[in-house]
Amino acid sequence: MAQSAPAQARSKPANKIGVLAKLHSIQIGGGKAGSRINKADLIYIIRNLATLVANGVALPKALHTLSHERSLQKYADMLDTIRRKVAAGESFSKTLALFPETFSSLLINHVRVGERAGTLPSTLVQITEQLETSDNLKRAIVKKLAYPIMLTVVGTLAVTFMLLFVVPIFEETYAETGVPLPLVTRFMIGSGAFLATHGWWLFLLGLGIVFGVRYARRNPDYAYLMDRQLLHLPLFGDWLRDIAVLQFMEVLGNMLEAGFTMVDALRISAGSVGNYAVKRSVEELQSAVTRGERFSRELERHGELFPPVVSQLVIVGEQTGTVPKATADVRQHLKREIERKTSLLVGTIEPILTIGLASMIGCILLAIYLPMFDMIGAMNPGH
């Protein structure tokens, strides 16, 4: 029965697969209300469903139990709707599909395979582990990047405040005394005046650029060009590439472990990649494998996007007939690489930001105090 599950899943129309959202962006809502759920609540729901069903609790009863949890009250209507549908004889995966903006197609397909193979509890556990792993990695990255981001924001606000409110006060004082101003002071006064006059326009320009980029990315060709350039950025390029390849390998490995063929797994995996350059390469991989090409050979042909270690692990997996295990090893390798490169990135950015902000603030203070020394000297000509 486990072997027939992938074949039955593949017999469904291709549009049932659609464009797949990443696991870490799965949302849960209460139908029309469209409420969202954070990652912790999502993991809580799926983990407890797996625990209850694995211990003999019927799925409708398990859903009923979760709908009465105080911490999940805002999702009670949705959980109760799913419970009623399942109790009436609908499959769990088909019921989840009633919430297309809530559950990703990847999650639904994974649950469908688990139902048909009779391994729904272990499938739910596997989904929970995937979500927890991606969430832990995301938290680790955010934690490491938090300080540089905070330093940038606080430093920018401090410099802006000094230029807009502190420098003008000293400008008035020096204008009254008639003290000649050095170049650095004149530059800071001019910068503050420009910022005061055109600051809002600069802010609106920044917003316009952000919304313009987001609008342009709706066109897959423009998004592809942007993402391809991002992958060539110093420091950031390899880091972004590894994140995109990890997204791909996570879904590919899970689909292979669930029993999907390589062709079907690649088709599903392509939709899980956020970077359009890597996504297009995955689509080319899928087309080549459909024609009968070896997966590992195609990875080597896209060596600019897939690191050599990834290709070698897949080659070994093909030779030994353990491609799912090879993808698991690839995922572990990429996670270590992402953490290492994140630490390297932060270690490079932090001193640059610190020195840059300290230099800017030092220049402002120098611009303020240099005329003051001249003014004191003019008041005491005999000394």
Image (cartoon, grey):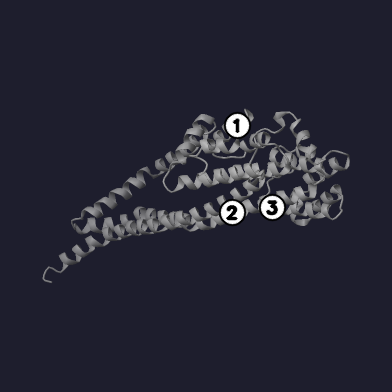
What is the three-letter code of the residue carrying label 2?
Leu
Pointer 1: what residue?
A: 293
Q: Earlier in the sequence, mark 3 or mark 2?
A: 3
Image quadrant assignment for residue 6: top right
In the displayed structure image, the side of residue 109 where residue 355 appears, left or right: left
Element marked by disc 1: loop
Residue at position x 28%, y 60% in the image: 368
Instruction: Give the number of the mark in front: 2 or 1.
Output: 1
What is the three-letter code of the residue carrying label 1?
Glu
Sort mark 3 into few (<14), some (14-19) or many (20+) by Cα contacts within 10 Å. Answer: some
What is the three-letter code of the residue carrying label 3?
Glu
Where in the figure is residue 355, as x and y percent of width and height? 35, 58
- In the depicted view, which residue is nearer to us: 134 or 79? 134
The label shown at residue 192 is none
Q: CA distance from mark 3 to mark 1?
A: 32 Å
Extreme residue toward the bottom, this view: 383
Where in the figure is residue 67, as x and y percent of width and height? 80, 51
Q: Earlier in the sequence, mark 2 or mark 1?
A: 2
Pointer 3: what residue?
A: 129
